[in-house]
Image (spheres, rainbow, N blue to C red):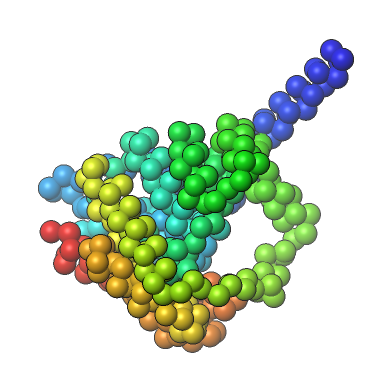
Amino acid sequence: MVMLLLAMICYFGALEILARKIYPSHSAIAARIFSDLEATLRLRHSSASERRTMLVVGNSLLLNGVDREQLRRLAEANGLSTSLLPIENTAYLDWYFGLRRLLAEGSRPDIIAVCLTPRQLVSRGTDGEFFARNLMQADDILLVKRAAGLDLTATSTYMLAHYSAWMGSRAGIRNWIKSQAIPGMDELAPYFPERAGPPAPAPIVRDVAVQRLSDLSGLCAPVGCRVLLVVPPVASKSAYDFLESTVKQAAAETRVPFLMPIAPGELAAELFADGFHLNARGAAVFTPTLARSLSAAVAADFP
C-alpha cells in the first residue's frame, strides 16, 4: 500500500510538472496565452500626458481577425496603447469572471473592449477546465455554478482544475500532443465547421444582454475602467438572425458603446478561412477598420 501510494504521488507529481513547466515552454498557444495574461496584469491607468490603455479581450475571432502589431501602431497614432488577450473557445462568462479575476489581481486598463458575437454574449457556456484554472477565482465558484448551470460533478471538476495545472491544462495538452503527432492537423479545421443552434426568443436575448452588459459596466466602474462591446465580422448576415439589433438595443439601454466596424455579410467569402474566422487577408481588412472604430469610440464616449 505504501509503495502504491508513493507511485501515485510520483505519477500525479509528474503530471503537474508537465503542465506547469514543460507544456507552457513547448506549446506556442500556451506560451502566447500566458504571456498575454502576464502583460494584462501589468496594465495601469494612464496619466494625463500618456496614451490611454485599452485591453481587448476575445476568442479565436479576435486572434485570427486582428493583426496585433498593425493594430498597436494604428492605435498609438490616435493616442491609444492597446493590449490584446485572445483566448480560444471563450464566451461571455469566461470574460466576465476572467475580468473579475484580472481586476482583482491588479490589472488597471483605462478601457476594456470585449470582442464577442451576439450569440457569444448571451451564451451560458465556458471554456471548461482551462477557464477554471486561468480565468476563474476560487471564491467565484458558486457564482459560476449558477451562471453556467453546472451540476455538482462539473462544479467539483472546476474546483479541482482551479488548483491543479494538470486538470486545468489537460485538454490543451491533448491538443498539443495531437498537433505534434499529426502535422497540419489545423488545416483540417475548415472542413469541420461549428453548427450553431437556434437562438433564444428576442425578449429573452434582450433581457440577458441588458443584464450582462450592465454587469460588465458594474464590474469595471469601481476600479476606474470603462467597457465597450466590439462585434467581429461574420460572413453572412443571416448568421445573426435578429440578434444584432437586439443586442445593439441592449447596449444603448445600458450605455455601453456598441461597435460593429464591419457589418455582417459585408466581407467577401474568400476573406474567411472557414466561413467564420477571418484569414490573413481578412485580418488585413478588419484591423485598420477596427483601429478607426476604437479611436472614434474613445473620442466620442470616453472624454
Residue 289 against residue 149 in the figure, above or below: below
For this rendering, which residue is in front, 15 or 77? 15
For the residue pair 148 and 251, the one nearer the viewer reads as: 148
Q: Position of residue 28 (x, y in %)?
A: 59, 50
Total marks in image: 0
Residue visible at 51% across and 73% down? 199
Horizontally, residue 135 falls left or right of residue 18, namely left
| Left/right of residue 131 with respect to residue 183 in the rendered view | left
Q: Position of residue 273 (x, y in %)?
A: 58, 76
Query: Foreground: 221 or 60?
Result: 221
The residue sitting at 29% across, 42% down in the picture is 108
Up-down relation of residue 60 to residue 265 (above or below):
above
| Residue 93 on image: x %, y % | 46, 53
Q: Quadrant of the C terminus?
A: bottom left
Residue 284, can we see it?
A: no
At 55% from the left and 39% from the top, the residue drawn is 133
One can see residue 131 in this view: yes
Depicted 260 relative to depicted 255: above or below = below
On screen, 293 above or below 217? below
Looking at the image, which is closer to me, 272 or 184? 272
Quarter occupied by the N terminus = top right
Q: Is residue 118 left or right of residue 54?
A: right
Decide if residue 59 is on the left or right side of residue 53. right
Quarter residue 130 falls in: top right
Residue 97 percent location from the top left of the image: 43, 46
Q: Residue at x 12, y 48 (%)?
A: 48
